[in-house]
Image (spheres, rainbow, N blue to C red):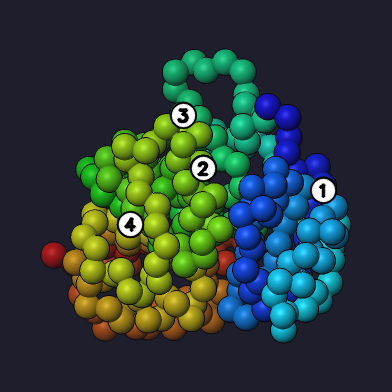
Amino acid sequence: MIKPYNMLYIYYFDGVPFVDEMVQNNETFLGTWVEEEISFLFFSSCADDMVKEILIKNKGIGLVEKYEMTGEQWHGDKIEPYYVNDLCICPPWNKPAGNNGTIKKIVLDPGVVFGTGRHQTTEDCLDLIHRLCTENSIESVLDIGTGTGLLSLGAAALGCKQVMACDFNLLAVKTTLNNIRLNRFEDRILAFQARGEEIMGIACDLLVANIHYDVMRHMIESPFLLEKKWFILSGLLNSEAKKVLASLSCKNVHIIERRCLDGIWNTILGKRAC
C-alpha cells in the first residue's frame, strides 16, 4: 500500500459547512474535523475549486485560512512502526515483515485524526491495558475518547471479547471504524459517537478515558464509576491530576498507580475497592 498522506490540504472554516455527496465521494476528500463552531476540511490534493462551491452553498460561513503540509507535519511525528511490550503498532503501508508468533500486530491508519499513538498518555494507557489484560481476566472495555481507536484495538488484540470505542467527534469514529476493519475486529469492537459523560452507565470490566479534564471531571462524579472494576484515566496535566485524585480520594476506590514519565502528562490506574 502506498502512503496516502504525503501532502494534506487543510481548509479552516469559521463554521461547519454542509458537505454534499459530490465532495464526500471525491477520492481526494479525507474528512471534516469539527470543533464546536469551527471546522477543518482535509484533502489529499488542492481543492480550491471544491471549496469555492462549498462556500457558495453555505452562506454565512467563511474560509479563515488554508494550510499545506505533510501528514507527518500534521501529526507532529513520523508515522512508522513502534512497539509497546509485545504489541507492534504499524501503518498499513509499512508493516514489518515476519512474525515469530510472540508479536501481536495492530494496523493503525491515523487518517487525519491528530496523533499517531506516540503521545505519552496513549503509550501509558496502552502499557497499562497490556498489564491488566495479561494479569487479569478483562472481558469488556469501554474506551471513551477513542480517537483513532488504538486503545480499543490494543484491548481486542490482547483478548478482550467486548470493546466499546466512543468519541464525540464523528471523524474520529469513522477513523476508528476503518481501523477496526483493517484489523478484522468487527466481532470484538463497536465504535459509536457519544459524549463520554453520558455513557458512564455502560457496564464493563475496564473503563479507559484519555480525554480533556473538562470532560473527565464530570465523568468521575458519576455514580457509575464505582461499578467499574478497573479504570485508567489519562490526558491530565499535573494540576488536573491532583484535582482528579482529590475527588477520587472521597470515593470507594483504590489508586494503584499514577504515572507522569515526562513530568507533564498524567495517567492514573485505579480499582474499585472491595
- Please identify the quarter of the rendering in which residue 92 is found: top right
Q: Earlier in the sequence, mark 1 or mark 2?
A: 1
How far apart are the alpha carbons under marks 4 and 2? Answer: 19 Å
Q: Which residue is mark 1?
A: 45
Give coordinates of residue 231: x percent, y percent: 32, 62
- Please identify the quarter of the rendering in which residue 227 is found: bottom left
Q: Which residue is mark 4?
A: 142
Give coordinates of residue 2: x percent, y percent: 73, 30
Q: Are marks 4 and 1 in contact (CB under 8 Å)?
A: no
Q: Earlier in the sequence, mark 3 or mark 2?
A: 3
Which element is circle 2 on? helix
Which element is circle 4 on? strand
Q: Tag 2: Cα neighbours inside 10 Å, few (<14), some, or many (≥20)?
A: some
- Residue drawn at x 71%, y 62% is 41
The answer to whether residue 183 is seen in the rendering is yes
260 shown above or below 24: below
Q: Amino acid at mark 1?
A: Ser
Q: Tag 1: Cα neighbours inside 10 Å, few (<14), some, or many (≥20)?
A: some
Q: Quadrant of the C terminus?
A: bottom left
Q: Amino acid at mark 4?
A: Leu
Q: Which residue is mark 3?
A: 104
Q: Of circles 1 and 3, which is in front?
A: 1
Q: Tag 3: Cα neighbours inside 10 Å, few (<14), some, or many (≥20)?
A: some
Which element is circle 3 on? strand
Q: Earlier in the sequence, mark 4 or mark 1?
A: 1
How far apart are the alpha carbons under marks 1 and 3? Answer: 34 Å
Q: Of circles 4 and 2, which is in front?
A: 2
How far apart are the alpha carbons under marks 3 and 4? Answer: 21 Å
How far apart are the alpha carbons under marks 1 and 2? Answer: 21 Å
Q: Are marks 1 and 3 in contact (CB under 8 Å)?
A: no
Which element is circle 1 on? loop
- Please identify the quarter of the rendering in which residue 58 is found: bottom right
